[in-house]
Image: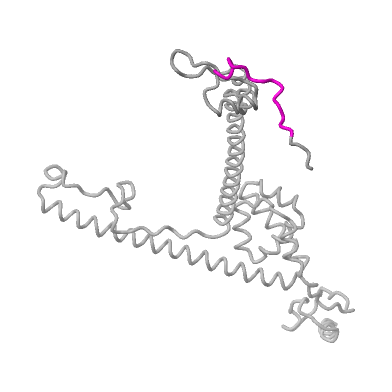
Amino acid sequence: MSDPVTVPVDPTPVTDAQVGELSSVADYRTYRETGALPKAPDASGEPVADPAAGDAAASLAPEPSATPEADAASEAGRELAKRKNSLQDRIDKAVKAQREAERRAEDAERRLLDRRAPQAPPQQDERAAPAAEDYLTRAKPSADQIGSTYADYDAFIEDLTDWKLDERHAREQRASAASAATRAEQDRLATYHDRLDGVRKKHADFDAVIQGAGNLPVSDPMRDYFLESEMGPEVQRHLCMHPEECVRIAGLPPVTALAALGKIESRLEAATAGPSSVAPVTNAPDPIKPVGGRSTGASTADPSQINSVAEWQKRRSEFV
């Protein structure tokens, strides 16, 4: 026979007064699980909240996450902006310095080219009206001068026509002279380069000597001398081998500098010239000047014209 089923009994039985406070089965179940009775509703009809339940709900509610203060955020933003501005300033300064270095390099290269290469005269558009100070003959006639300089309009037109013809002729002459000067400078440079080629063949170390000297000072008289003189490249090589002498000559006045370059050229010519031809020496004694006696026309010849011993003996026998 099976054991009898024992029904568990609640150790805290509900009294009649308490049961009267339970209005539903749900309240009863809540009471059995939690041991708390529902509170009586207040005047508005809403049930009064249990303080313990409120504290429990408050303890279970998630705490709000801590946010950084506004001042701290502003300070961090300002620090970040300051760093960005500092980095941008350094970038701007570096770019500016690079551009300045490039500009200086271009200026130095332009100045070097201006000194080494002849500059062609700028071409001027004849159709453009030049300023008054650019006229080559005289000031351009003006219609305002009619009645003072010119008797009438026809006289003004005639003088204006003459002025245009004179001005055009003067400009053509100037352009022709500039073109001739350019051609002469080009020919001079071509001749100089031909001389350079000759010196390179003579001195294998010519280019090495020129490059090894570096940037030596060269005045305008020195440059002209190098281009004009046949020994110009030789003198240039000598100065590169003696830089102190080149610096000294570059600081001299034009006339003195040209004289110093001429002396160097004379020394170089003497060093490169071969031995001079010497007249053959004979064993014949010096001719004797006759004191008296008769002589033929042949004996009156200049003794310096006697070129051999036989001729000297022949002339001597005429005086015996």
Quadrant location of the N terminus in the rendered image: top right
Residue shown at 19% from the left, 54% from the top: 160
Total count of labels: 0
Taking depth in this image into account, of 288 and 70 the one nearest to the observer is 70
Q: Which residues are magenta?
A: 6-20
Q: Residue furthest front?
A: 1
Taking depth in this image into account, of 123 and 101 the one nearest to the observer is 101
Query: In the rendering, at what x and y percent does residue 60 appear?
Result: 63, 27
Q: Magenta segment, principal secondary structure?
A: loop
Quarter-wise, where is residue 229 in the image?
bottom right
Q: Is 12 one of the magenta-colored residues?
A: yes
Q: Is 10 one of the magenta-colored residues?
A: yes
Looking at the image, can residue 4 be seen?
Answer: yes
Query: In the rendering, at what x and y percent does residue 107 appear?
Result: 56, 50
Taking depth in this image into account, of 91 and 57 the one nearest to the observer is 57
Query: In the rendering, at what x and y percent does residue 128 appear?
Result: 29, 55
Q: Residue furthest top?
A: 43
Residue shown at 66% from the left, 68% from the top: 196
Quarter-wise, where is residue 116 in the image?
bottom right
Q: Residue furthest right?
A: 283
Looking at the image, can residue 67 be seen?
Answer: no
Residue shown at 74% from the left, 52% from the top: 243
Query: In the rendering, at what x and y percent does residue 124 appear?
Result: 36, 58
Q: Is residue 308 above or below residue 100?
A: below
Residue shown at 57% from the left, 69% from the top: 190
Quarter-wise, where is residue 239 in the image?
bottom right
Q: Is residue 140 left or right of residue 144?
A: right
Q: Is residue 303 left or right of residue 13?
A: right
Quadrant location of the C terminus in the rendered image: bottom right
Scheme of image coloration: one colour
